[in-house]
Amino acid sequence: MSRSQVIAILTLSCLLTACGKEVHLKADAIEDRSAMPILDAGGVSTLISDSGVTRYRINADKWQVYDKAEPSYWEFTSGVCLEKFNEQLEVEASIRSDYAKYLDQQGLWELDGNVHAMNLEGEEFDTPQLFWNQHEERIYSDSTIRIRRATSTIEGVGFQSNQTMSEYTILQPTGFFPVDQTE
């Protein structure tokens, strides 16, 4: 064996020995568990039931659950689409937005950015921000709102409604209202 072959074998042996060593990596300890989600999911479509009856469907591109935060919450940073079902599994109301946060213990949804909803009567609601309190079964907003109905469009600032958006009040209304002069 030549001297260059011996050097090559020794060099290769040293490299293989170095590659075989275990490398231990350590991560820093998590100091604030409340800032880390227990669930981080994408492309979610899920049904939520109450007492064995399906009540809601949620579709979201990104869903994070912060169970150790005070208060605990769910966050939908890429938007959400919510549908509420009646007992016959018919959609009673639907709402979508660019961003949403759900305070699970309070049963309170905060929807922000291009909020769009439609009720059973086909009325469409558009606003930059909307709150839905599930425990009180009401929806409300202090923002501008536009409601498109079959024969008119109503605009205003501030809004209160039941959770199916079938009975509502605009706090400061504006808009055009057709009047039948024969009545």
Image: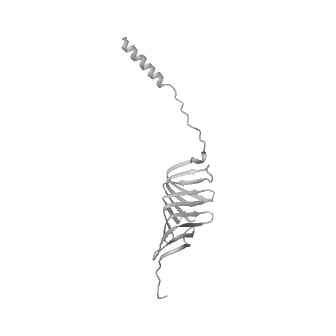
The image shows residue 89, relative to residue 152, as above or below, that is above
Q: Where is residue 157 in the image (x, y as percent from the top left)?
A: 52, 70
Q: In which quarter of the image is residue 84?
A: bottom right
Q: Where is residue 22 in the image (x, y as percent from the top left)?
A: 52, 27
The image shows residue 25, relative to residue 6, as above or below, that is below
Quadrant for the N terminus in the image: top left
Model colouring: one colour
Q: How many marks?
A: 0
The image shows residue 105, relative to residue 20, as above or below, that is below
Left or right of 38, for residue 175? left
Q: Residue at x 51, y 49 (%)?
A: 41
Near-viewer residue (84 or 52): 84
Q: Where is residue 92 in the image (x, y as percent from the top left)?
A: 53, 67
Q: Where is residue 180 in the image (x, y as percent from the top left)?
A: 47, 85
Near-viewer residue (88 or 146): 146
Q: Is residue 53 visible?
A: no
Q: Which residue is drawn at 42% across and 18% down?
A: 11
Q: Can residue 178 be seen in this view?
A: yes
